[in-house]
Image (tube, rainbow, N blue to C red):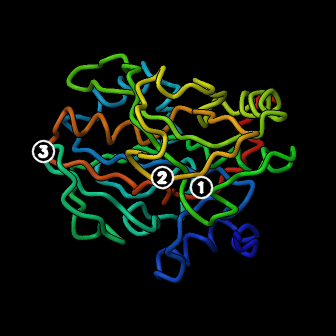
């Protein structure tokens, strides 16, 4: 069962524990009520094209903050943080290939890099819980299931690829409410983009996620799919930039922004 003590942490406390390698778990439910973000780091020669890609694909890539060239500080969402150390696990891609996962990127950071923070669906999970909608990955203390789909993103420059989705099993009696609740969070993916029938969006086997963990689906539940900030990783595999650094699935950046600041309630 998820340790609720993590939920009561402040963003600063959570980031400090992560930086000191004292909290190495996925961040689902950590610092409840605060916005979490996906991370993408690119060299400046690709930054404009990626920003355009995000603008054209706001559902999977809603931008929360962009750092200055060479700066690891996200001034809008966490001015006391350091992008290089404050995420539990990072992925290093070279020429589109995942070459490693590391706990900090001090030795990978370059002076011409730009970091993008993209809204994450973990942000609306506390609202789902408050509305009586259970979350299987909290119960199992695991990641969500994440899949590549056959839904193409709108290309921008050299960036193109499939939309990636996260899946949560939702009890059938709560389906309408789950849509209503998450619709209020457009900056963190908003309403689902698909409900049920995973094969209709190109998912051949629900028990074989491309990222994250397998989540069992009970008879009285339906798989619900939200656009996911892992989309840039799938795009990187196709676009093959010289270097691209991202968060590892489920290990998000915790911002100082209260989720209520991003809702449209």
> Residue at coordinates 80% horizontally, 26% vertically from top-left?
176
For the residues carrying marks 1 and 2, which lies nearer the camera in this image?
Answer: 1
Quick one: label 3 or label 1, which is nearer the N terminus? Answer: 3
Gap in angstroms between the C-alphas marked 1 and 2: 9 Å
Quick one: label 1 or label 2, which is nearer the N terminus? Answer: 2
Indicate the quadrant where residue 133 lies. top right
Question: Which secondary structure, mark 1?
Answer: strand
Q: The N terminus lies in which quarter of the figure? A: bottom right
Crowd tier of the residue under label 1, counting other residues whose Cα lies within 10 Å: few below 14, some 14–19, many 20 or above: many
Above or below: residue 224 compared with residue 100: above
Q: Which residue is mark 1?
A: 255
For the residues carrying marks 3 and 1, which lies nearer the camera in this image?
Answer: 3
Crowd tier of the residue under label 3, counting other residues whose Cα lies within 10 Å: few below 14, some 14–19, many 20 or above: some
Gap in angstroms between the C-alphas marked 3 and 2: 26 Å
Disc number placed over residue 168 in the picture, else none: none
Q: Which residue is mark 2?
A: 74
Q: Which residue is mark 3?
A: 95
Spot occupied by residue 144 in the image (x, y as percentages of width and height): 55, 51
> CB under 8 Å between callouts 3 and 1?
no
Front-most of residues 98 and 31? 98
Indicate the quadrant where residue 157 lies. top left
Front-most of residues 38 and 170? 170
Spot occupied by residue 21 in the image (x, y as percentages of width and height): 46, 81
> CB under 8 Å between callouts 1 and 2?
yes
> Residue at coordinates 59% horizontally, 55% vertically from top-left?
255
Question: Which secondary structure, mark 2?
Answer: loop
Indicate the quadrant where residue 193 lies. top right
Question: Which secondary structure, mark 3?
Answer: loop
> Residue at coordinates 64% horizontally, 74% vertically from top-left?
13
Q: Is residue 227 left or right of residue 260?
A: left
């Amino acid at each position: 069962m998820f340790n609720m003590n993590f939920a009561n942490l402040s963003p600063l406390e959570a980031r400090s524990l992560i930086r000191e390698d004292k909290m190495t778990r996925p961040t689902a439910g950590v610092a409840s009520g605060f916005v979490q973000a996906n991370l993408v780091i690119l060299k400046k020669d690709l930054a404009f094209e990626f920003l355009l890609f995000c603008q054209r694909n706001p559902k999977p890539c809603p931008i929360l903050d962009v750092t200055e060239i060479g700066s690891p500080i996200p001034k809008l969402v966490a001015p006391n943080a350091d992008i290089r150390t404050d995420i539990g696990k990072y992925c290093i891609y070279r020429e589109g290939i995942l070459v490693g996962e590391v706990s900090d990127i001090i030795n990978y950071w370059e002076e011409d890099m730009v970091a993008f923070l993209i809204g994450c669906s973990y942000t609306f999970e506390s609202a789902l819980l408050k509305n009586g909608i259970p979350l299987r990955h909290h119960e199992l203390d695991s990641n969500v299931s994440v899949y590549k789909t056959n839904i193409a993103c709108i290309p921008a420059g050299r960036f193109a690829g499939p939309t990636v989705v996260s899946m949560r099993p939702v009890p059938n009696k709560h389906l309408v409410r789950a849509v209503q609740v998450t619709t209020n969070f457009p900056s963190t993916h908003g309403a689902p983009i698909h409900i049920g029938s995973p094969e209709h969006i190109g998912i051949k086997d629900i028990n074989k996620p491309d990222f994250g963990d397998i989540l069992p689906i009970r008879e009285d539940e339906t798989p619900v799919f939200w656009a996911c900030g892992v989309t840039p990783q799938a795009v990187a595999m196709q676009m093959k930039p010289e270097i691209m650094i991202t968060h590892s699935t489920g290990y998000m950046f915790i911002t100082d922004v209260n989720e209520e600041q991003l809702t449209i309630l």
